[in-house]
């Protein structure tokens, strides 16, 4: 299963109202929840929530998470948390193991986390003692290094026939190739929201009349404000005039999913202009003279001018991808398979 990590545009509250119809599995970070303590009150109990400690984010911000605070938070919110990971200590496998023991002594059952680059003895311990484990630290390695690492570690999680002995979660897995090559029980990624925020959507290829998800998918710029709009024959959906067949194919996909490209016009107005509901400033600052400012007027809502709709389309893409994947458990084979990087 794919857990959607990250917060959609509009913040936590809007995401609850707008996106619950699309996704059932979400991953939230304890560290980021603490930045807005109302988040758990907004949690929809019908949604399966995977709680990550957020230790990596906390360390990057120079913040230390207290294991006892993490324990208390989980106990206070157990009614809405489906699964939760151990409080890992970045760069300290023994410290991570000690937190596992502390949380278990407190009556909790966290998923143990083994990190890229750690001594293999910790992984073997987790495989022997738990039904569900997680692999982390993978965002720090290149795809080639990760593949080499996973080729060595995944066989340890499987029996002699390649069938999984334990459930394995992959933290922050953004590579479709790595997602499809190994028998993960679950993964999480922020690709859906990060790609939308950068003005693009994922679109699968089409083969013999069917959308396919086991090979290269396209990451197509569609934003009305994208710098890739300049010129002709470009990669932006609206400038693909040299490849009209591909452009038509992409528009077909968008239409099949119930969305439109949308339409905007751009004009310069006085800085004193009061924004209407269908208007927004293009830049944060006015021109050099401080008199006029560029304005986007949305004439038709669509994925080109509403990032919320790009979020939705990217969620749909990953849900369709999940449906196309083999049902877990399936046998791991060292040879890899035809697939692609997202």
Image: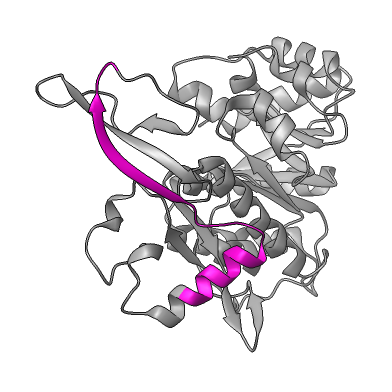
Relative vertical location of residue 295 with respect to residue 153 in this rendering, above or below = above
User: Magenta stretch: residue 283 in it?
Assistant: no
Identify which residue, 164 or 73, lies in the foreground.
73
Q: Position of residue 89 (x, y in %)?
A: 58, 26
User: Magenta stretch: residue 255 in it?
Assistant: yes
Q: Residue at x 74, y 27 (%)?
A: 100
Q: Residue at x 50, y 14 (%)?
A: 63
Relative vertical location of residue 118 with respect to residue 86 in this rendering, above or below = below
Residue situated furthest bottom in the rendering: 208
Indicate the quadrant where residue 190 lies: top right
Identify which residue, 43 or 60, lies in the foreground.
43
Left or right? Give the position of 5 relative to 143: right
- Could one spot residue 95 in this view of the protein? no
Q: Position of residue 323 (x, y in %)?
A: 76, 65
Q: Position of residue 331 (x, y in %)?
A: 77, 72
Looking at the rendering, the stretch of residues picked out in magenta corresponds to: 248-272
Residue situated furthest left in the rendering: 289
- Could one spot residue 222 in this view of the protein? yes
Left or right? Give the position of 283 relative to 289: right
Identify which residue, 271 or 96, lies in the foreground.
271
Q: Position of residue 259 (x, y in %)?
A: 61, 57
């Amino acid at each position: 299963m794919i857990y959607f990590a990250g917060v959609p545009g509009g913040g936590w509250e809007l995401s609850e109202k707008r996106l619950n119809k699309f996704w059932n599995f979400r991953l939230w970070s304890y560290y980021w929840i603490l930045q807005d303590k109302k988040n758990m009150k907004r949690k929809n109990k019908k949604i399966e929530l995977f709680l990550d400690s957020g230790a990596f984010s906390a360390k990057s911000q120079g913040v230390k998470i207290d294991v006892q605070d993490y324990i208390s938070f989980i106990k206070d919110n157990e009614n809405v948390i489906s699964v939760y990971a151990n409080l890992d200590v970045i760069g300290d496998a023994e410290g991570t193991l000690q937190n596992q023991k502390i949380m278990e002594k407190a009556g909790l059952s966290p998923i143990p986390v083994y990190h890229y680059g750690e001594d293999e003895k910790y992984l073997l311990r987790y495989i022997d003692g738990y039904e569900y484990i997680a692999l982390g630290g993978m965002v720090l390695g290149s795809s080639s290094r990760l593949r080499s690492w996973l080729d060595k570690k995944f066989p340890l999680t499987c029996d002699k026939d390649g069938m999984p002995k334990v459930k394995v979660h992959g933290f922050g897995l953004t590579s479709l190739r790595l997602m499809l090559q190994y028998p993960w029980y679950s993964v999480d990624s922020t690709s859906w929201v990060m790609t939308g925020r950068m003005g693009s959507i994922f679109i699968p290829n089409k083969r013999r009349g069917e959308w396919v998800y086991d090979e290269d998918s396209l990451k197509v710029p569609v934003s009305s404000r994208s710098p890739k709009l300049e010129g002709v024959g470009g990669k932006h959906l609206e400038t693909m005039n040299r490849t009209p067949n591909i452009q038509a194919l992409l528009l077909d996909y968008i239409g099949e999913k119930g969305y439109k490209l949308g339409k905007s016009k751009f004009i310069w107005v006085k800085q004193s202009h009061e924004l209407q509901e269908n208007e927004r400033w293009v830049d944060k600052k006015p021109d050099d003279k401080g008199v006029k400012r560029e304005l986007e007027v949305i004439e038709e809502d669509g994925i080109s001018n509403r990032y919320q709709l790009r979020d939705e389309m990217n969620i749909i893409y990953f849900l369709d991808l999940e449906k196309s994947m083999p049902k877990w458990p399936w046998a791991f084979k060292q040879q890899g398979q035809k697939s692609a990087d997202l």
